Image (cartoon, rainbow, N blue to C red):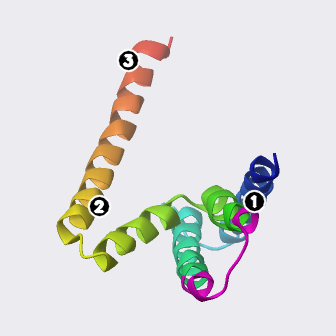
C-alpha cells in the first residue's frame, strides 16, 4: 500500500507542477506553439537526468524512488522517462535498440494519435 500511495502522491504533485507551468506560460506572448508541454518535457528531462545521476551514488528507498520517478516525473511528463530509457540503452551499448526505440516510439506514437483522431472523428462524433 505504501508503494501505491507513493506513486499516487507523486503523480498528483507532478500533474499540479505541469498545470502551474501551463498557467505561467499562458501569460507569455507565445501563440500556436505548445510551449507549456515543451517546457514541462525539457524540465522533466533535466530533472530525471539530475536525479538519476544523483541516486546512482546516493541510496534512496524504493518508496521515494517510486514517488519521484514513477509518480512525480510520470505525472509531470512521461517524455522524461522515454528520454532516460533511450539514454540508458545507449549507455548499455544497445545503440541499435536505442535508435529503434526512439524511431518506433515517435512514428507509432504519432500514428496512434492520428488513428485515435480518425476513429473519434469518423465513428464517435454524431
Q: Which residue is mark 1?
A: 10
Q: Residue 95: which quarter of the image? A: bottom left
Question: Which part of the image, by quadrant, shows the N terminus?
Answer: top right
Residue 114, compared with residue 68, is above or below; it is above
Counting from the top left corner in percent of width and height, residue 12 is at 77, 54
Q: Which residue in the rendered view is the most extreme toward the top?
A: 126
Asked if disc 2 and disc 1 are in contact, CB closer than 8 Å, the reply is no
Q: Which residues are magenta?
A: 53-64
Q: Nearer the viewer, residue 42 or 102?
A: 102
Q: Nearer the viewer, residue 33 or 82?
A: 82
**Dominant SS type (magenta):** helix
How many labels sit on residues? 3
As measured in the structure, the alpha-carbon distance from the residue carrying label 2 to the one carrying label 1 is: 26 Å
As measured in the structure, the alpha-carbon distance from the residue carrying label 3 to the one carrying label 2 is: 30 Å
Residue 95, compared with residue 4, is above or below; it is below
Counting from the top left corner in percent of width and height, residue 91 is at 33, 79
Q: For mark 3, give the secondary structure.
A: helix
As measured in the structure, the alpha-carbon distance from the residue carrying label 1 to the one carrying label 3 is: 37 Å
Q: Which residue is mark 3?
A: 122
Q: Which residue is mark 2?
A: 102
Q: Residue 47: which quarter of the image? A: bottom right
Determine the residue positioned at 50% across, 63% down.
81
Dot 2 or dot 1: first in sequence order is 1
Determine the residue positioned at 68% across, 81% down.
59
Q: For mark 2, give the secondary structure.
A: helix
Closer to the eye: label 1 or 3:
1
Counting from the top left corner in percent of width and height, residue 18 is at 68, 62
Q: For mark 1, give the secondary structure.
A: helix
Q: Is residue 61 magenta?
A: yes
Judge whether residue 1 can be spotted in this image. yes
Amino acid at each position: 500500500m505504501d508503494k501505491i500511495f507513493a506513486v499516487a502522491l507523486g503523480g498528483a504533485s507532478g500533474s499540479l507542477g505541469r498545470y502551474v507551468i501551463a498557467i505561467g506560460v499562458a501569460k507569455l506572448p507565445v501563440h500556436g506553439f505548445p510551449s507549456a508541454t515543451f517546457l514541462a518535457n525539457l524540465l522533466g528531462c533535466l530533472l530525471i537526468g539530475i536525479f538519476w545521476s544523483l541516486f546512482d551514488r546516493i541510496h534512496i528507498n524504493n518508496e521515494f524512488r517510486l514517488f519521484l520517478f514513477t509518480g512525480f516525473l510520470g505525472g509531470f511528463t512521461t517524455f522524461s522517462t522515454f528520454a532516460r530509457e533511450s539514454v540508458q540503452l545507449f549507455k548499455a551499448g544497445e545503440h541499435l535498440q536505442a535508435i529503434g526505440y526512439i524511431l518506433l516510439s515517435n512514428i507509432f506514437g504519432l500514428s496512434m494519435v492520428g488513428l485515435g483522431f480518425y476513429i473519434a472523428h469518423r465513428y464517435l462524433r454524431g
